[in-house]
Amino acid sequence: MGLWTGYWKGCIDRQELIVYNIVTLVGFYSLVEQKHISVAYI
C-alpha cells in the first residue's frame, strides 16, 4: 500500500513538474514575443 501511494505521489509530482516547466516556457516565450513586438513598434 505504501509502495503504491509513493508511486502515485511520484507520478503526480512528475506531472506537476512537467506542467510547471510548460507554464514557465510559455511565459518566457510570451515575454520574449512581447519584447520583439515592442521593439518592432519602436
Image (cartoon, rainbow, N blue to C red):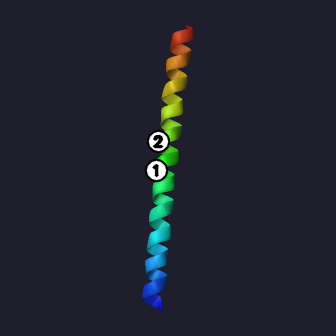
Q: Secondary structure at mark 1?
A: helix
Vertical placement of 31 versus 24: above or below? above
> Distance between the Cα atoms at labels 2 and 1?
6 Å
Vertical placement of 12 versus 20: above or below? below
Instruction: Give the tally of numbered discs.
Output: 2
Vertical placement of 22 versus 2: above or below? above
Vertical placement of 8 versus 24: above or below? below
For mark 1, does the 10 Å Cα neighbourhood hold few (<14), some (14 to 19), or many (20 or more) residues? Answer: few
- Type of the residue with mark 2: Leu
Residue at point 54%, 17% (across, down): 37
Q: Residue furthest top?
A: 42
The label shown at residue 41 is none
Q: Where's the C terminus, which quadrant?
A: top right
Residue 8 image offset from top left, x and y in percent: 48, 77
The label shown at residue 21 is 1
Residue at point 46%, 89% (across, down): 2
Residue 11 image offset from top left, x and y in percent: 45, 70
Q: Residue tagged by mark 2? A: 25
Residue 4 image offset from top left, x and y in percent: 46, 85
- Type of the residue with mark 1: Asn
Q: Are marks 2 and 1 in contact (CB under 8 Å)?
A: yes
For mark 2, does the 10 Å Cα neighbourhood hold few (<14), some (14 to 19), or many (20 or more) residues? Answer: few
